[in-house]
Image: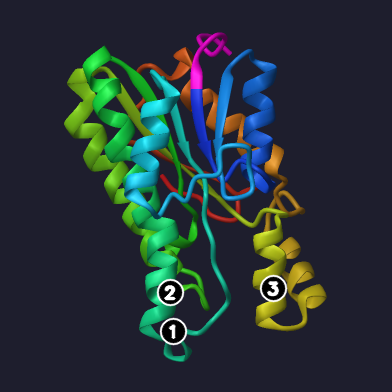
Amino acid sequence: MRGLKGKTAIVTGGAAGIGAAIVERFKAEGTKVLVFDLNGEQKVDITDYAAVKQAVAAAGPIEILVNNAGWDMFKPFLATDPAFWQKIIAINLVGPMNLLHCVLPGMAERGGGKVVNIASDAGRVGSSGEAPYSACKGGIIALTKTLARELASKGVRLNTVCPGLTETNMLEQFMLGAGNPDKLREAYRRAVPIGRLGKPEDIAGAVLFLASDDADFITGQTISVSGGLTMHG
């Protein structure tokens, strides 16, 4: 894809799952990638604003930001408590906001940059057992659209990718928490028109496109990568 070679990208949560697939695709395109992950080389807690600010400052000019890090656990809303809400919000909403607040000023000053925020179709249509997570992902979609409007004249493009059901450790843990994961996995598979769950590599392609020069005229958009499970028009 055009315009990725030689640029520098930050990918949060890039040590495993969807994030790792995104990192590998960027590297294949010749992009320098900094992985912000508690389990990566750059050990950065995205919920800690001071730590994020320090890490971003040390990274130098950032041309691409992918907010991918996330966490969830299956719990019906009435079985949750405020401590659980705060953990979900800190990782899935405050963390991306920290990165955006620290990275966007440099992009705006330099007159360009690409941001891809990973949300979820749970933030578009809801998902039983994921109320706080869905609320955060809906917030990410709205935040992305707002910042896309605010920064369009500065040459900064922001878009959202919403994975559907994707084979990751987080999905596995979610299904375990819901009970009977094998039955649930088969039900999920049948629900997807394409006939399978997504793979991390399926998400990476959409992310790289939105980060590339091929997407220069695209901003404020939300794209589902769900095998047709959700269809929006």
User: Can you identify the residue that label 1 sits on?
Assistant: 77
> Dot 3: what SS?
helix
The residue lying at 70 percent from left, 37 percent from top is: 201
In the rendered image, is residue 150 in sight?
yes
Residue marked by disc 3: 175
Q: Amino acid at mark 2?
A: Ala
**Percent x, y of residue 151:** 21, 27
Mark linked to residue 198: none
Magenta segment main secondary structure: loop
Asked whether residue 124 appears in the rendered view, the answer is no
Q: Measuring 51% from the left and 50% from the top, which residue is drawn there?
A: 231
Tell me the quarter of the image containing the N terminus. Answer: top right
Which residue is situated farthest in the right direction here?
A: 182
* Residue 85 screen position, x and y as percent: 39, 75
Asked if marks 1 and 2 touch (Cβ < 8 Å), the reply is yes
Q: Quadrant of residue 222?
A: top left
Q: Position of residue 232 (x, y in %)?
A: 44, 48
Inspect the image, locate mark 1, and give the three-letter code of the amino acid beneath it: Phe
Sequence order check: which comes first, mark 2 or mark 3? 2
Q: Earlier in the sequence, mark 1 or mark 2?
A: 1
* Residues rendered magenta in the picture: 1-8
Kindly identify which numbered label has been placed on residue 131: 2
- Residue located 44% across and 25% down the image: 59
- Which image quadrant is residue 53 in? top left
Other residues around mark 2 within 10 Å, as few (<14) / some (14–19) / many (≥20): many
Location of the C terminus by quadrant is top left
Q: Amino acid at mark 3?
A: Met
Is-magenta flag for residue 135?
A: no
Work out whether residue 208 or residue 100 is closer to the camera in this orientation and state it.
100
Residue 5 colored in magenta in the image: yes
